């Protein structure tokens, strides 16, 4: 087994085929965790699994849309069946589907709720029984094992962002879910926290002309990305003077997965290069 701060731990990370989730999967694996990699798209998910294995770690893919009603059970089940446990859950999968309120359809609004709120809810609910049984057994053995949940939010959720009423509402709901679950699951020794990113360089923040910003979800092509003329303004709002990298963003999530954060729960950590609006 690889030695590291997360040796022996099992982590499931939704949307870890690309971007921040991918960087996090590689980081947690480098610290010794075994990883269940999820993505909508099989090729990038398998590529991350292969990269982790090539680095001496252990990972398996669980491909699929987090909004599928049975996905939570399948995701948690993969960790339990393949690795015999579950210690870290990161609800990271997501995308944007922007528009000013008068142009947003019900379906556009609901899509953000489905992927950013309902899917994390179902994943956490699917893990509840395992957490209950494991914590009860560990308590009977006189051991305290701290498990971790990190929900990925956005500064659009904590501070608002014009053109993102659907996305920001959903990301704000994740803050409420985090705070409630930290209270429900403290007795199970599960720390539940939230990371809200500012401006991180991934395909979601590329100029809309970039072909990678057209994302296919269940056969429908969605336009993500940021209007090119806004990128300079966004960058100039960051005290550190630049967007964060996926690796820097993953570093913020890693802090809340590491043993150093074992007494931190119910918090929202802003990873935004110093932005505070
Ligand atoms: N990039 C930023 O500046 C930024 C800022 C705030 C919050 N976020 C959040 O960070 C998270 C990661 O985003 P990213 O920037 O790395 O984007 P990304 O597009 O690079 O990576 C997200 C991954 O999630 C997958 N995914 C999307 N919807 C999915 C679904 N329904 N089921 C399974 N997989 C799905 C995608 O296929 C993709 O591989 C998202 O929740 C996003 O909202 C990003």
Image (cartoon, rainbow, N blue to C red):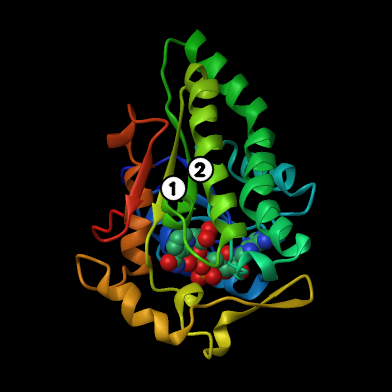
Q: Residue at x 49, y 78 (%)?
A: 226
Ligand 1 near label 1 (Cβ, under 8 Å)?
Answer: no
Provide the secondary structure element on which disc 1 rests. loop
Tell which of 12 and 108 is nearer to you. Answer: 108
Whether residue 153 appears in this view of the structure is yes
Residue highlighted by disc 1: 33
Residue 215 falls left or right of residue 226? right
Name the image quarter holding the C terminus: bottom left
Q: How crowded is mark 1: few (under 14 residues within 10 Å), some or many (20 or more)?
A: many
| Residue 83 appears left or right of 21 | right
Q: Position of residue 33 (x, y in %)?
A: 44, 47
- Residue under pointer 2: 10
Which quadrant of the figure has residue 61?
Answer: bottom right
Q: In this view, does 167 lie above or below 214?
A: above
Ligand 1, seen in the image, is in the quarter at bottom right
Mark 1 touching mark 2, by CB under 8 A? Answer: yes
The image shows residue 38, relative to residue 188, as above or below, that is: below
| Camera-nearest residue between 174 and 69 | 174
Kindly report the distance in space between the C-alpha atoms of the residues bearing marks 1 and 2: 5 Å
The residue under the point 60% across, 37% down is 84
Residue at x 56%, y 84% (from the top left corner): 212
218 is higher (above) or lower (below) than 79: below
- Which residue is pictured at 70% across the width and 53% down the height? 114
- Residue 268, image x, y percentages: 39, 41
Residue at the left extreme, as displayed = 240
Query: Depth check: 227 or 221 in front?
Result: 227
Q: Position of residue 10 (x, y in %)?
A: 51, 43
Q: What element carries label 2?
A: strand
Q: Which mark is residue 148?
A: none
Locate residue 248: give its quadrant: bottom left
**Looking at the image, which is closer to me, 80 or 13?**
13
Side (left or right) of 242 relative to 138: left
């Amino acid at each position: 087994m690889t030695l590291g701060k997360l040796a022996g731990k099992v982590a499931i990370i939704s949307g870890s085929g690309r971007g921040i989730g991918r960087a996090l999967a590689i980081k947690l694996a480098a610290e010794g965790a075994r990883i269940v990699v999820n993505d909508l798209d099989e090729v990038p998910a398998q590529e991350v699994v292969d990269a982790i294995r090539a680095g001496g770690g252990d990972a398996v893919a669980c491909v699929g849309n987090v909004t599928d009603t049975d996905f939570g059970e399948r995701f948690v089940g993969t960790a339990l069946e393949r690795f015999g446990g579950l210690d870290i859950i990161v609800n990271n999968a997501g995308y944007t589907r922007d528009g000013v309120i008068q142009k947003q359809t019900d379906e556009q609004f609901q899509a953000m709720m489905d992927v950013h709120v309902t899917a994390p809810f179902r994943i956490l609910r699917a893990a509840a029984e395992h957490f209950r049984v494991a914590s009860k057994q560990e308590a009977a053995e006189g051991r305290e094992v701290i498990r971790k949940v990190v929900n990925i939010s956005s500064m659009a959720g904590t501070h608002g962002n014009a053109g993102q009423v659907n996305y920001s509402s959903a990301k704000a709901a994740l803050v409420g879910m985090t705070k409630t679950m930290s209270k429900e699951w403290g007795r199970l020794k599960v720390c539940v926290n939230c990371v809200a990113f500012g401006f991180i360089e991934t395909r979601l923040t590329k100029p809309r002309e970039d072909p990678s910003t057209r994302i296919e979800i269940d056969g429908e092509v969605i336009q993500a990305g940021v209007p090119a003329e806004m990128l300079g303004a966004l960058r100039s709002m960051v005290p550190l003077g630049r967007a964060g990298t996926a690796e820097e963003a993953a570093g913020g999530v890693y802090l809340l997965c590491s043993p150093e954060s074992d007494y931190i729960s119910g918090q929202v950590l802003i990873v935004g290069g110093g932005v505070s609006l």
